Image (cartoon, grey):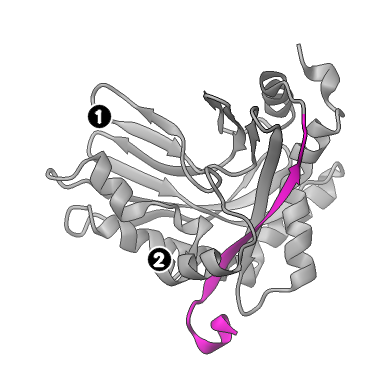
Amino acid sequence: QHIQRGDIYEMNYCQEFYAESSELNTLEVFRALNRVSKAPFSCYFKLGNCHLISASPERFIKKDGTHVISQPIKGTRRRSTDKEEDARLKAELFENQKERSENVMIVDLVRNDLSRIAKKDSVKVDELFGVYTFDQVHHMISTISCELREDKGLKDVFEAAFPMGSMTGAPKIRAMELIEKFEQTKRGLYSGAVGYISPEGDFDFNVVIRSMQYNALNKYLSFMVGGAITIGSDAELEYEECLVKAKALFEVLEGKYAESVS
């Protein structure tokens, strides 16, 4: 109804999978996940009783000197063990108008976010609708860049761009309000960012997706997956996409890759 009324054009709706009273060796789980899903922005993070096991394929934001890039993911297809079918699925993702529409909405959102901290006329789209292949999925990724203004730093960049637009929807603030209203679980660190800051002030942060959160004190394990809801969405297909994204997480927890753990 909110999309039909024009309140929003797209919302990234997420759902939680969880287990209570779970005993988990988080480092071993991370090693297994990292072998089966070799994601470029994987990380293992522990703070007190809270553990993050991440196989994220998505970059939130990177700064190198004055150059800033953001690489939102919007658009997913499963992999196939059959080479011909796998190539067909990849081509289908590239040509799909719904996926392109979702992707370009977020590209426009990220361009707007970066314009707040960018030098005049420096925001540009370096790549639109790039299709990249990972162990479990094909993803459509676009790259947006800008040159950072001299008076802007890390705090300003995060104030302008966080959270990643691919995890909210558009318009961003209204989508976040509806996420708060309709999602059944607080996201916590999910859809946030983990990264590093160099002594020179450069940084690189991921988007916390394809990630498990584990609380060792109350033995609560959870992960969330989601997808973009637009006027053209099919509920069954959106749910199937969520299961594709969660496939590696389920399989690692079920012990299918236990032999990979050293």
Please, what secondary structure does the residue beneath circle 1 have?
loop
The three-letter amino acid code for the residue at tag 1 is Gly
Q: In this view of the protein, which residue sits in the foreground, 247 or 128?
A: 247
Magenta region, residue range: 1-22
Instruction: Please identify the quadrant where the N terminus is shown.
Output: bottom right
Residue lying farthest to the front in this orientation: 218
Q: How crowded is mark 2: few (under 14 residues within 10 Å), some or many (20 or more)?
A: some
Give the residue type that dot 2 points to.
Asp
Asked where in the image residue 69 lies, by quadrant, the reply is top left
For the C terminus, the quadrant is top right
Looking at the image, which residue is at 27% across and 40% down? 154
Is residue 141 depicted above or below 248 in this figure? below
**Residue 127 versus residue 11: which sits nearer the camera?**
11
Residue 98 vs 51, above or below: the answer is below
Local secondary structure at mark 2: helix
The residue at the point 26 percent across, 43 percent down is 155
Q: Is residue 7 magenta?
A: yes
